[in-house]
Image (tube, grey):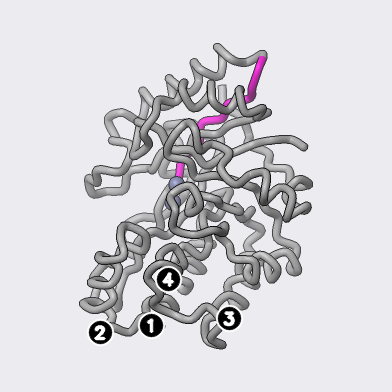
Amino acid sequence: MHKTNFHTHTVWCDGKDTAEAVVLSAMEKGFDAIGFSSHMAFPEACDWQLKPELAGGYVREIRSLRRKYASRIEIFCGGEADYIRGVTTPEKKRYESMGLDYLIGSVHTVVAPDGGRVSVDSSPALLEAGIRECFAGDAKAFVCEYFRQQREMLKFDFDILGHPDLVRKFNVRHPYFDETASWYVSQLEESALAIAASGKIVEVNTGAISRGWLDDAYPSPVFRKMLRERGVRFVLSSDSHAADTVDCGFERFAEAEKYIGKTVFPPRGGS
Ligand SMILES: [Zn+2]
Ligand SMILES: [Zn+2]
């Protein structure tokens, strides 16, 4: 099997280790390819993103690592870009000057009807406060809005849909909605149809396992099944924020989800 991971964070954004440390770890773990996906900046400054003034340095460093280790591993330079309704969109043309190989599109922030913003994955306390203040305590309304905004995002030009049910992150340790409720299953079905129609590749993201939030990947087994039945292509990713978690959970999901191994993700390749 071709072992790859295209979702990786480093000290260029909110990761713990340098890009070179990640490359060394990936080679030791037998990867054929590794892709970097720093959080792209949106118009407002934010401490977990790649600072706009460092964007050139990021690309240069990844390209130089690619040359240095060319005989041992393929290295790609990508980004993870947010969709925040009315604020920013994950579109390759926004980052054209960086010459990225690929772009992951992700929703980490839900915009409420009154314009308030709720962080999906920062902390259970912030999520709870956001739902209380921006959605009058209605978790169902918040979760439905998350999926609605994610479906809106699909019209933009990016390659991989990031963690498509991130709303589950805290739902085991701090339950706030029922994943078997019919309204939730309907949201998954509607999203699976929209994702299939968009042609986007979906990542099976093990990031919540290394962080200790879930003993499962995004998307959930139920959601994965719906997506698979609609012919969606998958790519396995760790969303790692440290060198030692670059293949966290890979063995388990590669084994459990045979279809992942058949997925070919073709980054265009920069110079
Ligand atoms: Zn993300
Ligand atoms: Zn990420």
Question: Who's the residue at 33% across and 84% down the image?
Answer: 138
Determine the CA span between mark 1 and mark 3: 14 Å
**In this rendering, position of residue 181 left or right of residue 233:** left
- Mark 2 vs mark 4: in front: 2
At a point 49% along the width and 15% down the height, the residue shown is 64
For numbered disc 1, what is the local secondary structure? helix
- Residue denoted by label 4: 146
Disc nearer the start of the sequence (2/4): 2
Kind of residue at badge 4:
Tyr
Q: Nearer the viewer, residue 174 or 221?
A: 174
Image position of 237 with respect to 225: above or below: above
Residue drawn at x 62%, y 69% is 223
Q: CA distance from mark 2 to mark 3?
A: 23 Å
In the displayed structure, does residue 14 sit left or right of residue 259?
left
Describe the element under mark 4 as helix, strand or loop: helix
> What is the distance, in whole Å, between disc 2 and disc 4 at their CAs?
15 Å
- Asked if labels 2 and 1 touch by Cβ distance under 8 angstroms, the answer is yes
The residue at which mark 2 appears reads as: 136
Where's the N terminus, which quadrant?
Answer: top right
Mark number, residue 141: 1
Q: Which mark is residue 4?
A: none
Position of residue 2 measured from the top left corner of the image (x, y, whole percent): 74, 35
The reply to whether the magenta stretch includes residue 73 is yes
